[in-house]
């Protein structure tokens, strides 16, 4: 056999050895239980199987956050929390979107291959326009183009996201396809990796847990706050008397017990037989959440108390993306006839 046949095919230098994944997370400040169970836990699990890049998307946030101090603080809080909850800067890359401004250039270039109609038809754009009618800024329209640029800049092939992001990922694929068709094969068409995580309902037991609704359980907050939030939760609304049997399948407190400890079936049985009351079950849940997040709470506190260290970690993340971003941009400018 010749040498060439036995040697593995060398890969083009721009392609990573492990598949590269990319995901963006909004700088909403200290994350809540829904953020952790719905996304962050999954990010943590993926960091060893893939070359993982996680970005705190502050440019995207400017489409709805207009206070510079709030944006800066929430960006740092999210960064500290991601690390506290298990993203290890040695095993993955964590960076802040605006620390790598090449992405805005790529966004502009992508704008020129993206028909306006695609953006106007995007369901998230329609929702946002309805939610903030007094501020329908152009950033809202072009939001998915920036997201496409995020993913394409490091040529990521997989994108872990929740189902709500499906239309954005579909657009990313279309934009990349349009670029490749016009300028030659440049970017992989990224695939979504849907997180299997449940939709976590808020303390109201009705709507998805969300900071803007104010129905959150703030897992990194002080224990008293967590207790207060858990004790305020709606349970089975048909269980009125303490002696009424509970219905764990419709009780949000019981549902959340699934994620904390492996004895949730026993807890459910206690509810069904009215051995346990809602208050008992909530107290237990609050304590378990407090205990589960105790180490993360401590790391979070340390990082927030040491902004120099935190910024150092984020600077390093942005530096790690630099050569990747520069290589992509050089290729793109060349293909498009710039420079
Ligand atoms: N739009 C995403 C959200 O609101 C955040 C995001 C921005 C993103 N850029 C991304 C997610 C790239 C995945 C990949 O959650």
Image (spheres, rainbow, N blue to C red):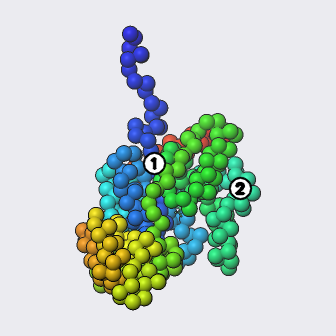
Give the quarter of the image for residue 94.
bottom left
Comparing 277 with 139, the one in front is 277
Is the Cβ of the residue at disc 2 closer than 8 Å to that at disc 1?
Answer: no
Residue, x 72% and y 62% (percent of image)? 120
Quadrant where the image shows the C terminus: top right
Asked whether, in this view, residue 50 is left or right of residue 335, the answer is left
Quadrant including the N terminus: top left
Disc assigned to residue 21: 1
Task: Reply above or below: 96 against 73.
Answer: above
Q: Residue at x 43, y 27 (%)?
A: 10
Q: Is residue 241 visible?
A: yes
Residue at 40 percent of width and 61 percent of height: 40
Q: Is residue 33 visible?
A: no
**Image x and y of residue 82, in percent:** 37, 63
The image position of residue 126, as x and y in percent, is 68, 68
**Residue at 47% of width from left, 78% of height from top?**
205
Mark 2 sits near ligand 1, with its Cβ under 8 Å away: no
Answer above or below: position of 289 versus 24.
below
Q: Position of residue 56 (x, y in %)?
A: 46, 62
Within 10 Å of disc 1 (Cα), the crowding (few <14, some 14-19, many 20+) is: many
Residue that carries the numbered disc 2 in the rendered image? 118
């Amino acid at each position: 056999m010749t040498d060439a046949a036995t040697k593995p095919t060398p890969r083009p230098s721009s392609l990573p050895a492990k598949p590269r994944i990319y995901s963006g997370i909004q700088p909403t400040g200290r994350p809540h239980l829904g953020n952790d169970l719905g996304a962050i836990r999954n990010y943590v699990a993926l960091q060893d199987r893939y070359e993982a890049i996680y970005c705190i998307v502050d440019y995207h946030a400017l489409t709805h956050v207009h206070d510079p101090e709030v944006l800066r603080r929430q960006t740092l809080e999210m960064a500290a929390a991601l690390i506290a909850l298990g993203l290890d800067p040695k095993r993955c890359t964590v960076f802040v979107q605006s620390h790598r401004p090449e992405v805005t250039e790529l966004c502009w270039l992508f704008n020129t291959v993206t028909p306006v109609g695609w953006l106007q038809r995007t369901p998230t754009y329609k929702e946002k326009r309805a939610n903030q009618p007094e501020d329908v800024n152009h950033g809202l329209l072009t939001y998915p183009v920036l997201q496409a640029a995020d993913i394409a800049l490091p040529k990521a092939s997989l994108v872990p996201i929740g189902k709500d992001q499906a239309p954005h990922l579909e657009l990313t694929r279309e934009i990349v396809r349009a670029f490749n068709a016009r300028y030659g094969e440049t970017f992989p068409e990224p695939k979504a990796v849907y997180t299997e995580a449940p939709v976590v309902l808020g303390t109201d037991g009705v709507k998805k847990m969300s900071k803007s609704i104010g129905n959150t359980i703030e897992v990194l907050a002080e224990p008293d706050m967590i207790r207060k939030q858990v004790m305020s939760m709606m349970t089975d609304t048909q269980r009125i008397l303490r002696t009424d049997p509970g219905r764990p399948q419709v009780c949000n407190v019981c549902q959340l017990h699934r994620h904390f400890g492996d004895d949730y079936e026993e807890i459910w049985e206690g509810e069904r037989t009215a051995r346990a009351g809602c208050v008992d079950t909530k107290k237990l849940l609050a304590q378990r959440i407090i205990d589960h997040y105790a180490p993360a709470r401590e790391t979070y506190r340390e990082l927030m108390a040491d902004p120099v260290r935190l910024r150092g970690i984020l600077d390093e993340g942005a530096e790690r993306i630099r050569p990747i971003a520069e290589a992509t941009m050089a290729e793109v400018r060349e293909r498009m006839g710039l420079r």
